[in-house]
Image (spheres, grey):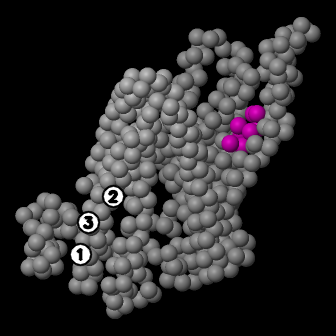
Amino acid sequence: MSVGSIVLVVLVLAALGYFFGRRRAVAASAKSGVKLHSLSGYYGQTVALFTAVPALLLMVAWLFVQPIIIESRVSDMIPDSVIPQGGALSLVMSDVRQIAGGLDAVLANTELSEEALNSGEVDFTTIRARMAEVGVALAGDVPQEVYEAAKAYRQGADIGRLMMTVAVIGLALGLLAWSMRRIEPRMRARNVSENFVQALLIGSSTIAILTTVGIVFSLVFETINFFKLYPASEFFFSTVWNPQFRGGSDLGILPLLWGTLYVSLVALLVAVPVGLMIAIYLADYAGSTLRSFAKPAIEVLAGIPTIVYGLFALITFGPFLRDWIAQPLGLGSSSSSVLTAGLVMGVMIIPFVSSLSDDIINAVPQAMRDGSYALGATQSETIKRVILPAALPGIVGAILLAASRAIGETMIVVLGAGAAARLDLNPFEAMTTVTVKIVSQLTGDTEFASPETLVAFALGLTLFVITLGLNVLALYIVRRYREQYE
């Protein structure tokens, strides 16, 4: 039974538990003459929660643990003679998983039977031809040992799925019967239900925290492995980025940091003035009709996929800057440049600045405006000397959050700024950023045992520290200098 089918069965059991639990509570109250402690719906909720939640948690844990156990057992079946030089067992296991998936596709879409596959009546050459027919192509020669390991992997997965189905549905049925028997009029069903929901909310919050911790630790551990293979001093202070997967690489981060900060600076030079002026206009000059239309229209820019901005930079804006500015002035001949990516990215993050700044400006009390007008100040003077100083901490926080968004952008830089890692002040030259190189170093068939691949994690950790610092600084400024109004 598939995972979706198991979830559906558990939810159906939970719905039945809610209906019959509520009905049993009402019947028990009528029979004993004792008033229910809680509303009848809480009794049904108690049965439904005890039926569904533990069973679904068991299923999630099973799906997490089962592949680890199966791969551990199957990897022991693979002899050292079929493992490529360098001990790349993960590549062999990738072939095992691909072949196992291909066997499932062959059994589902051809006349080949499970018995013929398990008995060995059909050789691997025939199986491979059948895989090609259903769209599963294997690269290179696959040893017979890998094929046998794939069969064992598939059998283990089938057995594990069957055991998971029995365990999950059995647990749901058992808890359904147990929770039904617990129902009585004096049962504090509301307390049980609310405590259960509170535990679910705490668990959801914990998942978000643990996800962040897991991301950080994965970056840290892989970065430590990278620095065991490549000197940290050369990574942080070298001005050359030249990865060579055959050895002799120069992996200096300085050109990538320079490109990242340069493109982000250009983007902020566009987004901050325009976004701030939009916010001021919408907050203090525009009427309610125009504001109700203009603000959602501007925020649509934030919903456009970044690949669309990248294509605009590559096809339209980049050639325009090259043909009308860069080449006539002798500053460059490439349509990919820092200015191309920075200007387009600046347009993309305008809503981040304008929307946040608009909300902050509107939070300034009307009494401060009225007091300024009462003293004879004009509207522009009120904005410059009263409203903006009062809203400045929040505006600075919005700018720093927009900077974090710009630093983490990838697609616009790939298509608009190019992939050249260099230290240059000319904004019409092609450069690249940290995020682009993270993608390029992890693209293709890679084995996480070389510095050229592990460097992506060091780059990611560095970028994480930079953006985290900007976010912390934004929060500090907002909390330290914001004004509290009655």
Circle 3 sits in a helix, a strand or a loop, which is it? helix
Q: CA distance from mark 2 to mark 3?
A: 14 Å
Q: CA distance from mark 1 to mark 3?
A: 11 Å
- Between tags 2 and 3, which lies in front? 2
Figure quadrant of residue 127: bottom left
Residue 184 picture quarter: top left
Can residue 232 be spotted in the picture? yes
Report the span colored magenta.
394-401
Image position, residue 316 (x, y; %)? 48, 42
The residue pinned by badge 3 equals 158
Amino acid type at circle 3 is Asp
Q: Name the residue: 62% across, 47% down.
A: 406
For mark 2, what is the residue? 167
The kind of secondary structure element at disc 1 is: helix
Q: In the image shown, does 124 or 442 lie closer to the viewer?
A: 124
Circles 2, 1 touching at the beta carbon (< 8 Å): no
Q: Amino acid at mark 1?
A: Lys
Magenta span contains residue 398: yes
Q: Above or below — where is 223 with respect to 63?
A: below
Q: Quadrant of the C terminus?
A: top right
Measured in 3D between alpha carbons, the distance from the residue under mark 2 to the one under mark 1, in whole angstroms, is: 24 Å
Amino acid bearing label 2: Ala
Residue named by callout 1:
151
Residue at the extreme bottom of the image, as rendered: 81
